Amino acid sequence: MTVVRITRFRTDPANEQAMIEKRAALITAVRESFPGLTEARLGRLEDGTWVDHWYWQDAESMQKALAAGPTMPAAGAAFSLTTDVAAETAEIVAVV
């Protein structure tokens, strides 16, 4: 069953472009090491909070990548530019 990992965070406006570039590098690294990431979308809310949605083909694929995250240099680089990070996971139950 498809799942989505939703991560909310903030970044200094001066670091926005660097954060976007490091996020892209992280996505590339994850896809090279962990099959199952099908889509990643990034949005910015009106209050400046960023919302990142990563869609996975199943929870097992996502869990493997999450477990390895702390050892991935690209993850450290991307998250070094963020603050107030909070994440949650949802199972996709309907698509219209």
Image: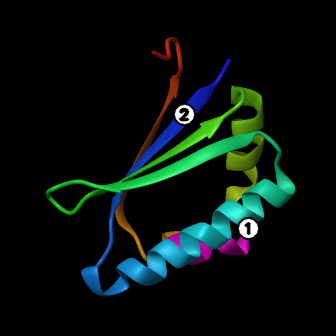
Check the image and report above or below for 34 versus 19. above
Amino acid type of the residue tagged 2 in the rendering = Val
- Say if the magenta span includes residue 5: no
Check the image and report above or below for 18 versus 2. below
Per the image, label 2 sits on a secondary structure element best described as strand
The answer to whether residue 29 of the structure is visible from this angle is yes
- For the stretch drawn in magenta, the main secondary structure is helix
Check the image and report above or below for 13 versus 92. below
Q: Nearer the viewer, residue 94 or 4?
A: 94
Q: Residue furthest left?
A: 47
The number of numbered badges drawn on the structure is 2
Q: Earlier in the sequence, mark 2 or mark 1?
A: 2
The residue drawn where x is 77% and y is 55% is 31
Q: CA distance from mark 2 to mark 1?
A: 20 Å
Check the image and report above or below for 9 versus 74. above
Q: Which residue is mark 1?
A: 72
Q: Residue furthest top?
A: 93
The residue drawn where x is 61% and y is 44% is 39
Split into 4 quadrants, where in the image is the N terminus? top right
Which x, y percent locates residue 92?
A: 53, 20
Residue range highlighted in magenta: 70-78
The residue drawn where x is 71% and y is 30% is 57
Q: Quadrant of residue 72?
A: bottom right
* Numbered badge on residue 4: 2
